Image: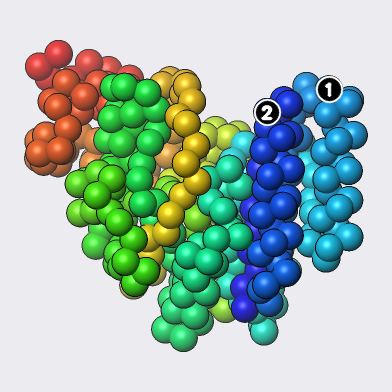
Amino acid sequence: MATIWHRYLVNDRPALDGLKQLSNRMMAAAAKSRHTFCLLINRSANLQMELDEEMMAVAGTLIGRGIVVITAPARGAGNALFTSLFSWPQDATSPVNVLLDGDQWDISRKEVLDVVDALAARLSKDKLLFGLGARDRVVLGIGEDDLVRQVEETYFARMMQPRIELSNPLGIDLTKVPASYRKYGDPIPGFYAVNTAHPKFTELRTGVQAASMTPEIAKWAGDPYTVIKAAQLAEKIISIYAPIIDNPPGTHDMGALRRKTVALSNTDIGTSWGKLLQDEKFASELGRWYPATVVQQARELMLGVRTAGS
């Protein structure tokens, strides 16, 4: 068994409607599974009172079904990751904590539950520290922004090499998975599993906790920091493909690429991160999958400077 967390941000009416859908999915999954289910709702400071009352009603329904619900002020995805994966009391009988993004993964789908089961079993049986789900398609934005963000994520995945072990036991159709992800892995899928009984768990938790004290990590870069740190500590990280929810892509603040780079540069992984960003050989390799102008744009956004050839 595992403890399955969802994190979800409520900041407006559409998000609240999404929370209601997530609630139904969680109740359906809990009814057919022995896992422990938990939901961390991050509440926007500007949430209207009417929406807040509806949100609390949803939380009450879930609690009545035996699902643990925590509501907290929104402090960023990284803060939510630490709260769920690393702050929950350890349970020797169920040592694996799993975190899913509530708007991206449908836990009521058999395939997604199967991957949770597989990750929990492998982490416990093989005494592994960390595992990932992997998206069956990657849509991070509209137009060129999508490709720029894919390049950024491929940098995160490259930082984790050679630790990621990809597998597809469910036979998921991977035709929509970008080639760079098929080679290096899906580093920040919003689907994470950690083995709290692993000897390196305390070291990983200490590192994530220290990094999360920095507001930029808590808000912007908690996910990439955690997976990269886990890769440094683990012998390997297993990653299993599963189907994601078909959500339309939204807009993204591309300035976040620079903020994440600065945040990561100020942690204990900063030196190796900086070296990779300056690695012309890897930038050239990315040109196998992405237009040179896209790679250049991504690097300039991350580095905050114009690169050679611009």
Does 269 sit left or right of 35 as displayed? left
The one of 57 and 101 positioned closer to us in this rendering: 57
Kindly identify which residue carries mark 1. Answer: 48
Could you say which is closer to the camera, residue 161 or residue 43?
A: 43
Percent position of residue 94, x then y: 65, 79
The C terminus, quarter of image: top left
Graded by Cα atoms within 10 Å as few (under 14), some (14 to 19) or many (20 or more), the crowding at tag 2 reads few
Q: Position of residue 215 (x, y in %)?
A: 60, 34
Q: Are marks 2 and 1 in contact (CB under 8 Å)?
A: no
* Amino acid type of the residue tagged 1 in the rendering: Gln
Q: How is the image coloured?
A: rainbow
How many badges with numbers are in the image? 2
Indicate the secondary structure of the residue bearing disc 2.
helix
Q: Give the residue number, with chain letter if any, for mark 2.
A: 14
Quarter in which the N terminus is drawn: bottom right
Reply above or below: 231 against 226. below
- Above or below residue 32? Residue 74 is above
Cα separation, mark 2 vs mark 1, equals 13 Å
Say above or below: 127 vs 170: below
Q: Please tell me which residue lies in front, 178 or 203.
A: 178
Amino acid on which the number 2 mark rests in the picture: Pro
Please tell me which residue is depicted at 45% across the width and 29% down the height of the picture: 249
Displayed quadrant of residue 150: top left
Foreground disc of the pair 2, 1 = 2
Q: Earlier in the sequence, mark 2 or mark 1?
A: 2
Q: Residue at x 78, y 21 (%)?
A: 46
**Percent x, y for residue 159?**
29, 50
